[in-house]
Amino acid sequence: MKFDGNRAWTEAVRAISANREVLLVMAGVFFFLPGLIAAFLLSGLQTEMQAGLTAMMAAPKSPAVLQQMMHIYSEIAPYVILLLLVQSVGYMAMLALLTDQRRPTVGEAMAIGARCLPALVGAILLFIVGYMFASLPLGLIVLAFITALGAQLGSAIGVTIVLLVLILAVTRLSLTLPVIVIEGLHNPVTALVRSWRITAGTCLRLLAFYVLLGVAYLVITIALSALLSLMSAGTGQAYELISGTVSGVIGAITSIVMTAILAAVHRQLGGPSREAISETFL
């Protein structure tokens, strides 16, 4: 089936409009509040990370700077992983609310998201393992271009090809999350294979659609960040509160939009699930 981005966007907007109250509640619980809390808890570590990145740019080969960055990453990693897990449950819970014909309550949708989490984590780990195995042939491609065209041009072309392959693979697997929730495929391998199959023949159209959404997100985020910088001095608790609030709002709205889009894209490419998901978009 040929993918229609306009249709997917229209259906996503319709779904958000029909379920906006409950989606706002879910986004507030899983994205706005965690984002706001993280902004306060991790503000000191974020400052250290920015200072470390600045030092690394000034002395990229310094062992002391690299050790400092590794220390910062080790401290921030548990919080980031916990936040990602919470938000993953939120995404899947909102997908259940949008697509489950049984009309689950917020609590039931959260339970569905929690039950689906191991399958999603497994799929992510499988993707990482697959990427590690693919790194060797991809590295040989880069090396071949460097050998044939020289260090600068060869590495630029080789790395570009590797990035394109990675982006296309991620696009083909982008429906893994709705496949797990909507189709109930809790086997990570089966879910990845299913996403790969239903995106066949429409990868470039789907990628272009995602790129347009990403550009719109970047423009809005940059504009809001610039406005925030003009409205505040850029330091102090007041700035952290405003910055955390704005970041939380952006994250909550983005989560709602992306969830509705994933549901609409899956509906278009995957067809009706075992439940009549089309009724959700009426």
Image: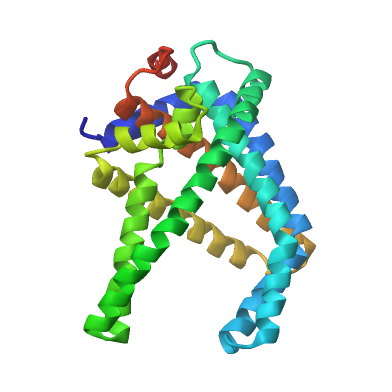
Horizontal side, residue 87 vs residue 235: left or right: left
Q: Nearer the viewer, residue 236 or 61?
A: 61
Horizontal side, residue 119 vs residue 282: left or right: right
- Residue at x 57% of width, y 85% of height: 60
Figure quadrant of the C terminus: top left
For the question of whether residue 31 can be seen, the reply is no
- Residue at x 32% of width, y 51% of height: 168
Q: Is residue 33 above or below residue 183?
A: below
- Residue at x 31% of width, y 48% of height: 207
Instruction: Find residue 94 and report its horizontal and vertical position in percent.
Output: 56, 28
Horizontal side, residue 210 vs residue 63: left or right: left
Q: Nearer the viewer, residue 67 or 80?
A: 67
How many marks can you see? Answer: 0
Instruction: Find residue 144 and report its horizontal and vertical position in percent.
Output: 27, 75
Looking at the picture, the colour scheme in use is: rainbow
For the question of whether residue 77 can be seen, the reply is yes
Instruction: Find residue 214 and report its horizontal and vertical position in percent.
Output: 40, 52
Q: Say which quarter of the image contains residue 91.
A: top right
Q: Is residue 244 above or below residue 254?
A: below
Instruction: Find residue 203 and report its horizontal and vertical position in percent.
Output: 27, 44
Q: Say which quarter of the image contains residue 133.
A: bottom left
Figure quadrant of the N terminus: top left
Q: Is residue 216 above or below residue 7?
A: below
Horizontal side, residue 194 vs residue 256: left or right: left
Q: Nearer the viewer, residue 122 or 101?
A: 122
